[in-house]
Image (cartoon, rainbow, N blue to C red):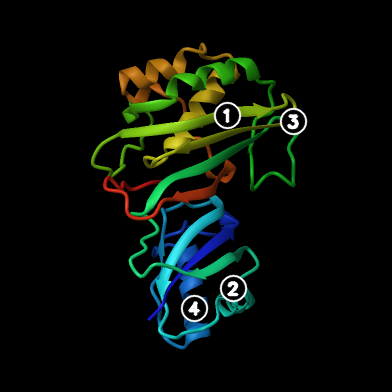
Amino acid sequence: MPRVKLVLEYDGSNYVGWQIQQNGPSVQGRLQRALQELLDVPVAVYAAGRTDSGVHATGQVVMFDSPRQLPTKAYWMGLNGLLPDDIAVVTAEECDPAFDPRRWARGKRYRYRLSNRRSRSPMRRHTHWEIFQPLNLAAMQECVMPLLGKHDFSGFRASDCQAAHANRELTKLELSGTVGDEISLVIEGTAFLKHMVRNIMGSVVEVGRGKEPPSFLATILSGRDRTRAGQTAPPQGLTLEAVFYGDGPREDADDDE
C-alpha cells in the first residue's frame, strides 16, 4: 500500500477550514470525497496543519495511504478532474512509508496580505485585509523585529489554543510593500500557535495606524498577555505558502494554526 504525498493549493473562502467539521464543507472533506471517487474506497487524508475558515494555501502538504498502485500522474490529473475549481493538486509523489506531514515538518512559511488602497477592491476582498487609511510602513517594519528568534508567544495565541506550551521560534519576518497599495508580512517559523500569525498582524496594524508605538509588539511579547494585543486579523489575508521538511520526524512536533 503506497503512501502518497500531495501538495495542495486552495482558496479557503468557501470552506470552514482544512479539517472536517459539522457546520459546513471543508477542504479535507472535498479531497477525501474526490479520492473515494478515484479509488472506489474511502481514504483518510492527513495534513501538515489545520487552516482556519477563510484561510488559503498554496503549499499545504497532505498524505494518504493508497489502496491501489497508480502512477503519480493519476493522482495529480485524476484528482484535479474531480476536485472543485477552488482546490487543486500541485504535485503528487510516493513518499517514505513512515512520512507524517505534521510530525516531519521542520518549518512553515505564511504570508499575510493587506490592501491599503483608499477604496475597496473587488478583486482583493477574498485575499487581503482591506485597510483604507494610510499606514506607516517604517513603523510596522520596526515593530516586528523583536519577534525573531525563540520566545514564549502567549501574548499572540488564541484563547482556545490547545498547544501544550507557547514556545516557538520565528526564523524570518519580512514586511514589505507600498503604502496606498499592497503590504505583506512573510513569516517563517518552526511551528505556530492557533491564530498566532493573525494576532501578530492585528497588532502590527495598530502600529501602522499610529494607535500604538513601534515598541508595542515587544511589550506584548514580554507581557505574555493576549488581552493587550490588537484584534485577530481577518482570515482571508492569510495564506500557508510552504511547509519545509528534513529527512525524518521532528522530536518536538507541535500543533499549528
Measured as percent of width and height from the top left, residue 122 is found at: 74, 46
Q: Which residue is mark 4?
A: 35
Residue type beneath disc 2: Trp
Q: Secondary structure at mark 2?
A: helix
Q: Residues within 10 Å of mark 2 (few under 14, many from 20)?
A: some
Q: Which residue is mark 2?
A: 76
Give the quarter of the image for residue 91: bottom right
Cβ–Cβ under 8 Å for marks 2 and 4: no
Q: Position of residue 76 (x, y in %)?
A: 59, 73
Which amino acid, by three-letter code, is at mark 1? Glu
The residue drawn where x is 56% and y is 25% is 205
Q: Is residue 133 left or right of residue 174?
A: right
Q: Which residue is mark 3?
A: 181
The CA distance from mark 4 to mark 1 is 37 Å
* Residue carrying label 1: 174
Q: Quadrant of residue 8?
A: bottom right
Q: Residue 4: in sight, yes or no?
A: yes
Decide: few, some or many residues near mark 3? Use Cα within 10 Å; few <14, some 14-19, many ≥20: some
Amino acid residing under circle 3: Asp
Q: Position of residue 130 (x, y in %)?
A: 65, 35
Give the mark, 2 or 1, whose residue is nearer the N terminus. Answer: 2
- Residue drawn at x 39%, y 15% is 219
Instruction: Measure the alpha-carbon separation of dots 3 and 1.
Output: 17 Å
- Report the quarter where the N terminus lies: bottom left
Mark 1: give few (<14), some (14-19) or many (20+) Cα within 10 Å.
Answer: few
Q: CA distance from mark 3 to mark 2?
A: 36 Å
Residue positioned most to the left: 164
Q: Position of residue 153 (x, y in %)?
A: 35, 29
Quote the CA–CA distance across marks 4 and 3. Answer: 40 Å
Residue type marked 4: Leu
